[in-house]
Each structure stands twice: as structure tokens, then as C-alpha cells.
Amino acid sequence: MLRADLAWLEAYRYQPRGPLPVPVTTFAGASDQAVPPARLAGWQRHTDTEVRGHQLPGGHFFPHDALAELATLIRDDLHAGRSPAGRPPGAPASAAGSGATRSADHRAPLGDTGWSVWRDALLRGTGFPAAGLDRFAAPELAATADALVPVDPQRAVHDDRFVAAYQAAVARGSAVAAELAADPLLREAVGWQNLNALTGLDHLLPGRGTGRPSKRRERETALIRYWQRYCGKNDTIGFFGPTCWVTVDPELAEVATVRPGSGLTRRRRVHYETWALDAYAQRLADDPAIRRWLPVVVSPEIHRDGRLAYRPAQPPVSLSAAAAAALSAADGRPAVEVVAELSTAPELGLRRADDGYLLLDGLVRQGLLRWGADLPLHPDAEAVLRERIAAIGTEPERGSARRGLDRLDAARDAVAAAAGDPEALRAALGGLAETFEAVTGQPAQRRAGQTYAGRALCYEDTDRDLDVVFGRPLLDELAGPLDILLRAARWLTVALADAYGDALHELYRELAAEPGPVRLSDLWYLAQGPLWGGGDRPVDAVAAQFAARWAGLFGDTGDGPVRRSAAELAPAVAAAFPAERPGWSAGFVHSPDLQLCATDVAALRRGDYQVVLGEMHVAWPTFDCAVFTEWHPDADRLRAALAADLGPGRVRLLYPPDWPRHTGRVAHSLADADDAHLGVAPGPVAATPGHLPASGVLVTEQDGGLVATDPAGRRRPLLELFSALLAMHAVDGFKLLAPAAHTARLSIDRLVVSRETWRTTVDRSGLAAARGDAARYLAVRRWRAELGLPERVYVKIDTEIKPFFVDLTSPQFAVALCNAARGARTRAGRDVPVSVTEMLPTPDECWVPDAAGRRYFSELRLQITDAEAMDG
């Protein structure tokens, strides 16, 4: 028998390499809990052929009890490896015979660049046709205004020609608004997002033209903000932003094959928002007879070492013997079991069960324990709640808890059944709100007025009724320009790793100067300054350097547009962005968003298209998201693919419940069984055994670098624990051009890498100062002329999260734009930055079809692996 160097094994850090060209054979004890047989199947990612698994009777030390049988199996396996029947050495195993797949089968080469693209891809798109954005256009009015503004802008507002044209355009726009307010699809979409907004739509319906004109304009503006989003923004939400998994097939000789189904969506599902389930779970926990059956667990950021409990950025808590025993026993079991265990130790002094419950309650108040349903921030929360209810050990309480959830389920099911009927949906959502308030005693909405906040009780997600396969010609077209961008992305991860490595090192030295070890929890607390603070941050310097290097590559862009070839740029890019490997492990995978501009499918297939880079998600495998994986036909295959590319044992952040814009529907969904889940703040504890409390991780300096050692002795580079936060900065830092008053459109071959953009402020635009709707329209036309803007643009005001579409010819859009500018000035002052970006693609450059021939905006999201660096 061989002896293992366990210290070396604990210190070993997995480095992704090419798969072994030989089979891997595993042996496991059938009842081994430490290394279960199923876990050994993970070796498939390390071999080009197959994994042969054997199970023998026994547990973790099965070799002692079955040595002869084990030796026979090893001998037979070695003989079989010399002369495999019917298959030459190194040949892949049959998937049918072994269930095995090649570790890189999920990827296809991106030309000869050294990068490889996943064969699965996402096509995100709108749920309303692109042509809807033109419904409020008023080109005749714009021409009239443009002829008058340069002559006498003050008198133009009273000019008879302008007044007549303006009133006619306003009337036409109001008629369109009335028509849309009655559109069942729009009413259904708005109903999902804001039931109260339906009342505003009601007042716009034909025949409801009473009331103050200013109030009608306000309602029309609200309608337009919804309409531009549903027609023009590739959000993934509801039926107005369905998910669509597509295939990348390098064997396909065409650009794409496209087959729309009979409807817009193929499937629709309604889920609870996690906060709504939390509210019901809390109501259950308010009943002491139920609470004792709910789990008790140590808060995810807390680490106990003997009689001390360590907390982030606070002194440790000295524990009594009973408190220490309680923290040791609080492993997720129901409180009744924990108290029963504590009661068997007389030295703890817990004479009655109530003494045990009081002890647990006190530790909860100290922030050391969590006692309740503790639902994960994940779509699985509903299933977890049902498990919690099923575990209630007394029937009256269990039945009561089930009945409350059954009432919610019936109301939620009525919402799902109302799909396609806006008035039925309105009633069903109202019914769910009433039921929720009745069973929880809580309001049926949270975070009123916020966007992307999961405000409602439930949400609907859908997948698109569309099948698309992209072929070799598209990959060949993208290979050169994407190689340029991806090499820069690789450098960006290295630069960020260096910059934040230095910043963390400086903070470490401050902490190391104090007595005692440096704990990750304390370093994490201090690191929030350089990560998110308002002063100069490392990411700002890196982003500036990144943009400066791109400026050197493109040279003086002037008014543009500027186009360079990938072949021309390649040598300079290699010199400007030298990096052989990414800065941290997640940097092996990037996710670019690409918009294909083509008039229709036929144009796309004949190669008459242009590609536009949307966002480059640097070091961010974006497929790892519940809202997407729910619709994939084989999420386990995606999970194995991600583990093959990034390796096992990744560190995942346990996001606190109040993390901005983080809800259950966007939670990670491809976690590997070996992944660790890092707790940095109070919140639900991971349901997996890989929970890692930040206060239990010690940071030390080794060979000039910082290393994090967890309570089990496993060591990792410190930056791996900051991976999620570094990726957020990498995405924000991937800007090719520094901000300027005007930046030209930049292209590499047929890929537009930066749209034409104009920058100003609310004050300089003059939009917030205009008074009266007609004057606002003329202010918009003057502003457009001064900057040389196209008629259709996207505007981003820094007080808002997302950009919004504006048709600068439309009086309705002009009012909406001026109102947004005025609101920004009121909230944040005169110098609020405003960015304006050309619209590309335009509505007549959309190719995604439905069965009726209507076309929709879309973006193709690829996931690309740095195979060259991985294998190098």
C-alpha cells in the first residue's frame, strides 16, 4: 500500500491543464461518507477517454477489509489497459457505454486563435417587435423645428408653422399611446412590473381623454418608458425578455440556421421571489412551537475556535462552555435536536429544554447563530421551505404551516394560469397580494420605486420559441477581432490582480503589525475602501491605463468612424497587452455580448451583416446564472463543463441578502460539489458542506504573495477569495476609450468594438431648464443639432441604472428626456454626467423573427475559454 503525504495534498492547488490521454480508474468504499463514490466521477474532467469506477464493500478504510479483491481489480484493470478490447489506446470511450464525454467536448476552436468557444450559447432578445420603437416618430415636425430654431429659437415656439406641426404630432402620438394602452400584451407586461401603473394606462384608453393635459403627458411618459424597454432592450425578464439557448456548431457550413416556432414563448414559469418566502418562513418562526423544529446554524461569517467565536471587524466573543457546545452542535439540525443533545451533558447546566432554547436565543441575538428557515437566495428556496415544513415534528403545527403555504400556492398558481390575459393577471396578482398579507402580516411589496430589486411577490420567466444554430462562417468572421479583445481582457485580469494584490498587501501589513494572526474577515472589511470607496481606487488606474493603451493602438480617431483590421493590430496588441495567463482562475472564461446587425435571416445567411460588441464580461462565466440554466436541457452538462474549464474547489461568495441587485433569479446555479462558499456577512448559509467562514480563514505571506488558509488547512492564493469582486471590476474596467466629449465609432474588421458616443452634463445640455412641452421639444432639437446626434439614440443619465432609448423627433420622447434631466438635476445637481450613444443596430437591422415575420432586437452571448493559457 502507498502512503500519502497529506500535508502536500492539502497544499496542492489545482492548475487546469490538458486532459490525460489515458483512462482513470477509481476505487471507493460503497458507504464512504468522506469521499462518496459519486464524487470520484469528477475525475472525468482530467481524462481524454473514460473513468472506470469500482465500488467495494466498506467505508473510508475499505482497502484494509478488501485488500485481496482490490489487488485483483487493479491487476485486471492494468491488463485491460494494455490491450483494450475493440478500442485502440487513447481512443475516446463511447458515451453510450460509459456515460463519459471528452473534457473539452463542450467547446469548439475559435479559428486558430488559441481560444475556444462553448457550443452552448445564449440569444437574449426583446419580447416586442423592434418596429415598435418607430411608433412615436415625428420626422415632419423635426424638419419644421430644425428650420426655425437656427433663425430665432426664442420665437420659434410661437411660430404658426411650428405650432401647427407640433399639435398635429402630439395628437398622433397621443393616439398611438391610447392604442398601446389598450394592447393586451403591453398591459400584461406592465402588470407584471407594476400593477399601479395599469391605472395610468386605463386613463390613456380611447374615450378617457378628460383631465389635465399635463397629467396625460405624465402618463404618456410612463408608457413610453415601458414601451422603449420592451421593444429595444435585451433584458431577460418575463415574456417580454425570453431566454433562448442556441448552438454553436463548427461543422455547419452556413452562418446560421433559424427556425421560429408558432409562438413567441415555448414555456412559461412563475416563481416566488425569495423575500416573499422569507416573510412566510419568518411568520412560521414567530410561533415557538414551530420554531423549535427549524434549523439552527452558525452564521456564515462566524468561526468558532474552542471557547472563542471570531467575527468580522470586531473582537472575538468569549463563550461559556454551554455556548461553545451550542455552536458546535448547531450544524443545521432542528433546534429540538440540538437542545436534546446539549441536555445530555449535565456539566453544561441546562436542566430543562427551555434553558437550551433560551441559550440558542441569546446566541442569535449576539449574531453568532441563525435560527429559522434560513432559505437560500436561490430559486431552490421554495423546495427548501417545503423541506423545513415537512421536518416539523408535530402534526398540528406542520399542518398549519402547510395550509398557509398551500394558500399562497393556490394564489400563485392562479397568477400562472392568467398568462395571456392581462385583466385576469391583474386580478390574480391582486389576489396573491391579499393572500400574502393575510398569511404573513407583511406588505405585499418591498423597495418601492427601485428597479432591478425583486419588488413583487413573484416573477415569470420564459424561453423563446426559436431554434438557432450558428456555424463556421460566423466563427471565422469573429475569430480575428475577438482574439484582439480577449488578449486585452487577459491582460486586464493580470493588471487588476497586480493592482489589488498590492492594495491587499498594504492592508495586510497594517493588520500584521497588530498582535495575533490576520483574519480574512478583517482584511475583507478594510478592502471595501479600495474596492468600492469614493476615492482613487486601483481599478480606476488600471482602467485608465487600459484605455490609454487602446488609444495608442487606434491613434487619432478624429470624428471617425475608424476601422482597423485584426491582422494589422495583432502585433501591436501583443506588445501593448502582454500576458500569458490570466490573473486569477476565473479569468480563463469570458462572456462577450454580440449584436448581429442584419435586415433579416436571409441577409444574415448570405453574410450581409455587421457585428457590434455590447458588454465584455471579463472573467465572468455568465451562463452560471439561475435565470438562464433553468431553461437549458441539461444543466448538469453545463456544470461539468464549467468545472472542466475552471477546476474544482472554486470559491464562491455567499452574497448578503441586501447585496445590490442580487436576487434569487440571478443566483449562481452551476456550483460544483467541491466548491467552497465564502461567508463574509450575516445571511443564509450554503446548503453544501463547503461553507467557508471569512473569520476562520487566516492570511499569511508566503514567497512574496498572500495566501489564505482555511480551517481545514487548505491554502489558496488570496485573490481567489476576491474573485467575484475582481470580476465586477474587470467588466466595468473593459472600456476601450477614455471618457471624452465625443468618441468615434471604432471597428476591428466587421466587429464594432465601440459605438459613437457624446458626453455632456445635465446643465450643459439645457434640457432641464426648458419650460413647457413645446419649448422642451425645441430644446431637444437644438441640443441634437449642437452635438450632431443621430435621430435615434440611447441616453444614460448617471442618476439612473440603465440607458434608455430616445427618438429625438418625437414630442413624447422629448418630454420624457427633459423630465429625466430635470429629475436628475433635482436629485444630484447640475453637473450630473449624461452620455449619448448611437443606436446600433437600428430597428431595420434586426433579424430574429417570429412565425409572423416580425423582427426583434437580440444579442448573442458567447462563453469563451482561454484554452491557450490553460494548456500552456
Image (cartoon, grey):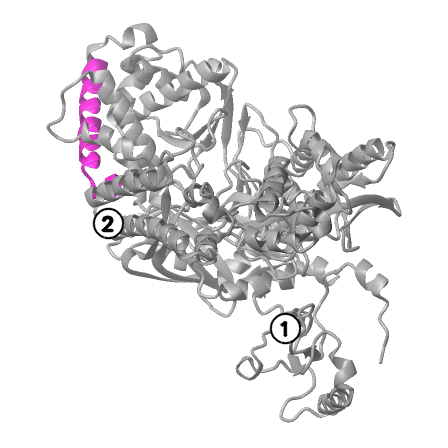
Tag of residue 742 = none
Residue 44 placement (x, y as % from top left): 64, 72
Question: Is 473 covered by the magenta stretch?
Answer: no
Q: Is residue 685 above or below residue 196?
A: below
For mark 1, give the secondary structure.
helix
Picture quarter with the N terminus: bottom right
The residue carrying mark 2 is 418
Residue 456 placement (x, y as % from top left): 37, 39
Q: Residue at x 65, y 80 (%)?
A: 53
For mark 2, give the secondary structure.
loop
Residue 609 placement (x, y as % from top left): 43, 51
Tag of residue 41 = 1
Residue 698 placement (x, y as % from top left): 79, 45
Q: Specify few, some or many for label 2: CA neighbours under 10 Å numbering under 14, 14-19, or 20 or more.
A: some
Would residue 728 be found to the left or right of residue 582 on screen?
A: left
Q: Is residue 810 above or below residue 120?
A: above
Magenta-highlighted stretch: main secondary structure?
helix
Q: Residue at x 17, y 29 (%)?
A: 175
Residue 562 vs residue 321, the one in the foreground: 321
Q: Amino acid at mark 2?
A: Ala
Q: Amino acid at mark 1?
A: Ala
Q: Residue furthest front?
A: 351
User: In which quarter of the view is residue 171 placed?
Assistant: top left
Q: Could you tell me if residue 367 is visible in this image? A: yes
Q: CA distance from mark 1 to mark 2?
A: 44 Å
Magenta segment: 161-188
**Which of the two labelled residues, at mark 1 and mark 2, occupies the earlier sequence position?**
1
Q: Could you tell me if residue 572 is visible in this image? A: no
